[in-house]
Image: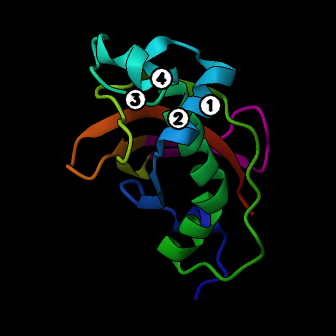
Amino acid sequence: MSKEPIYNLLEVGMKLELGVHTFEADEIIRFAKKFDPQRFHVSEEGARDSLFGKLCASGWHTGAMWMRYNVAQYVNELKRNTNYAGTEPVLGPSPGLRNLKWPAPVYVGDTVTFSSTLTGKRASPRRPGWAILSSHSTGVNQDGVTVISMDGAVSIRMD
């Protein structure tokens, strides 16, 4: 276990396993009614004659589940991947994300595994003592099909 600053231990290419989620019909419908009430998200009947042919989760729902697991596991995965034993790493805000894509639908019963791969790290030019971690994140279903992908960043204290 290392007490060296976690920033120094992070390596580009490091994969963070964030979590696994199975999407159920009631959850898909509940989310869609509140946030994305398109017919193929709110009822089996409405989905039948749509492009999807059956009930599927909103892409925003898939993204929200990625965020849930990201918040819950990101720091734990940084520590696990680096054998870090120092004080709890402090994350700051994200400057945003790019290239958000939903290349395939998430259907009822699909189990999606969420992960992020570190694609870069650099000291923040505006905030002394802080760095920016860049990553490519995905959600892959039980058949190995990518259902969400994005490139993002988060700030982290360097000490």
Residue 130 lies in the magenta stretch: yes
Q: CA distance from mark 2 to mark 1?
A: 5 Å
Q: Which of the numbered marks, if any, corresponds to residue 43? A: 4
- CA gap, disc 1 and disc 4: 12 Å
Q: Counting residues from the N terminus, which is met first, the one under dot 3 or under dot 1? A: 1
Q: How is the image coloured?
A: rainbow
Q: Quadrant of residue 30?
A: top right
Assess disc 4: are there few (<14), some (14-19) or many (≥20) residues with their C-alpha within 10 Å of its C-alpha. many
Contact? badges 2 and 1 (CB < 8 Å): yes
Which badge, 1 or 4, comes first in the chain's sequence?
1
Assess whether mark 2 and mark 3 are in contact (beta carbons under 8 angstroms).
yes
State the extent of the magenta-drawn residues as a range: 119-136
Q: Label 3, label 2: how many angstroms apart (C-alpha)?
A: 7 Å
Callout in the foreground (1, 4): 4
How far across and how far down the image is residue 92, in percent? 76, 45
Q: Residues within 10 Å of mark 2 (few under 14, many from 20)?
A: many
Which residue is located at x 61 percent, y 69 percent? 76
